[in-house]
Structures are given as C-alpha cells and as structure tokens.
Amino acid sequence: MGHEHGEKKQGGQGGHGTVLLKGPMLSPWVGDGLTIAATFLTNHAKLAHHGLRHDGGMNNARVAASYVQLLYEYLSSHGHDPERVLGPLPSSTEHFVPLPAWQAMLTRAQALDAAPALSLRIAQGISARHFGVLGYAALACATLGDALQRLERYHASVYDVNPVQVQPMAQGVCIEWGVERGRPGALVDETAVASLVQLARDMTGQPLAVAMVGFVNAAPADQAPYERFFGGPVLFEQPTTRLVLDLQLLALPLRKSDPGLLALLDQQAERMLREEAMPAAVPAPVEVWRATLVSLIRQGQTSLAQLAAAHHMSARSLQRRLAAQGSSFQSLLDDTRHRLALGYLRDPALELAEIALLLGYSEQSAFTRAFRHWTGLAPAQWRKQSAAASL
C-alpha cells in the first residue's frame, strides 16, 4: 500500500508470524484519490480532535451503556437470559459502564460460547443506536469519510478507552487506537473494531473489505474467521490497534444522509463534548433520549411507547424519568421537531410538504400550526427571513 516505512518483523509458524508496522506510513497522494484526499484533509481540520478524558489507566476507562446493550441482545438472540449471565441491564440514566465491568461481561459471555471469534459474531448485531449520538450523527453524514471524522472527534461518548486518531496515509486512511491507558484485552479490542467495520457496511450498504487490520493482542489459534470477516489481512501483536481503509471508500455515500439532521446532531455532540471536558460530567439523560427520538422521527415513530421501547423501559418509567429531569415527552418531542424544522428549512431543496413528512406529521397543515406556535411565523415566512438574513 504505497511506500511504507518503519520496522517489519517476520517470524512464527503456521501463519502466526508477527509483522510490526510503525509510523503513519504517509506518502504523497496519487491518481484519482487526490480530490478525495484534499476533501478529507480539509474537513478533518474543521473537526480537529479535542483532547478528551484519557487520564489514568484502564480502571478509569469506560464504554457507553448503549454500546453494552449489544452484548445483552446477542445473548438473548442465542437463547440465553442475558441478565442472569451479565447482571441487570444498565438503565438509560447509567450512561457509562466501567471498562473492567465490560471486560468481565465479555468474559462471562465467552464462557457460554466455545465457538471461535465471539467478538466478530457480537459485532454483526451493531446498529447506530448502540453508538448513541455519535452513531446517529455518523448515519446522517453524506459520506463514509465524513462519518469517520466524527468518530475521531466524538469517540469518547461511546468508547472512552484509548485515544483514537484518523490519519491519511498512502492511498488510504488509518484509524489508530493507542495504548496510553493500557491494553483492554482481545475481546474488548476486537469487538470495538469489528463493530465499527460492520456499522460502516450497514451505513453504506456495501460489503466493505479493509486494506489491513492490526491488533495489539496475541494471535488466536485460528485467524481464518478474522480474515473472512474483515476481507483483508489481519495482523496481531502490533504496537497499536489499527484499521486501514482504501482511500476510495471515503467517498462512498451513506444511505440515510440528512444534512439538516446532521446539523442538529453535531450540536448535541458538541454539548456532550463540552460536558466530557468537565470532571465526572456525563451527558444529560434528556440529550440521550433526544438523540434516539431524532432517529425515530425520521422513521415516522413519534410516540412515547416507541421511545421507551428503544431504551428498554416502560412508557411509565420513561415518563417518570423525564419528569425528574424537568421535562415531559411532549415537550421533548416538540423541541426536537422545532430544532429539526429550523435545519430543514435552511435547505432550499426541501419542499414544505417534504419537511412535514420528515418531522412525522401526516399533513402539512399540522406542521404549519406547530411551527407558528414555536416561532410566531409560518414556515415559508421564517424561511424567507432566514434566507434574507444570510445574504
């Protein structure tokens, strides 16, 4: 892959040789990839990574409760009672699960399942909701490259284990997890990387093959399942965990791209980023529920029961928790629709009838009444004023 530099070490038996790759392996962009590379680098600078909480060792690392739900769902789909195996499902107010607890959960799940490559099978059930606000923001991006840039900036809202960097390299892009906090173990590491690849496949609708995957952990007895899953070479005993994608993949369009929705989700993610910069701060529960509601609205699901089901709780329980946060489902729904509407109205390509449908209204007149209630203006009036103000 272009001009690699650094140290290589060959050895081992039975295909378990170790190859160490060091350095970012940067080289000049070539051929048709030049435009893609320039776009990626420009956008990458706009979303430059801010240092998040990477103090301390593995005992201070954590993963999102929404991500942990993936394992509960996997066990349930394979005939196990996940709460008997793993303990109670984290509630929606428990935003994070300490990494040692996540490691223990995966170990208990592995004890039930003797088949190899458990991490790869768990990852096949991933969806955007398991990644919370980051997942929904990625889903709304225009291209896979845009989604990867948000991964770098907002990753700690889901996977606050080791720092991640997204770096351009020879005819590709390298997503690299360091080892500053330590090594989280094979199950944790492999599940995270495989989940990211599976989510990218789902978002693009393409059976993406990676250029290379490298893990810090020792090689398993059978590497074939890993090579089949990733569709490319998989190396072990590397200095860092790395995922390398071909440059052309960055331009792949995402199936559910939504610029108006992305603007709202970026705002939410930025708020969460600021909260993460404060010691012991966690995202407000209402923001977590709002992120889920945004996705549900796009699917025409606007009921309390549907939002509660997405968070594995009863409608009554969600009502109580919203009240405890000084909110209600109706106010959350109205406020979320209001924010989405402002973003959609800034897009001149969208007709008012289309916006009404995107917001879950069966008729344009219902949207118009609601918008007048929020702003005192009809949607067309607000759009005209907004366009004039931006000149």
Image: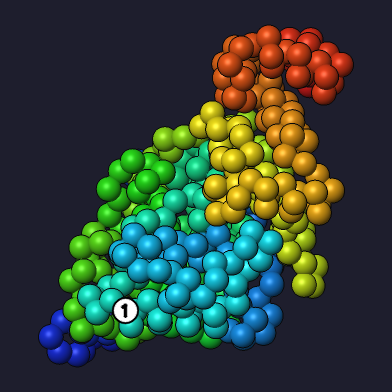
Residue under circle 1? 112
> Seen from this angle, which residue lies furthest left?
14
Q: Secondary structure at mark 1?
A: helix
On the image, the x and y values in percent for residue 126 come to: 41, 55
Q: Is residue 366 left or right of residue 325?
A: left
Task: Determine the residue positioned at 54% across, 48% down.
Answer: 310
Q: Nearer the viewer, residue 12 or 81?
A: 81
Q: Decide: is 187 above or below 173.
A: below
On the image, the x and y values in percent for residue 75 come to: 37, 66
Q: In the rendered image, which quarter contains the C terminus?
A: top right
Q: Is residue 231 left or right of residue 20?
A: left
Q: Quadrant of residue 262?
A: top right
Q: Quadrant of residue 233?
A: bottom left
> Seen from this angle, which residue lies furthest right?
376
Q: Is residue 222 visible?
A: yes
Q: Is residue 193 visible?
A: no
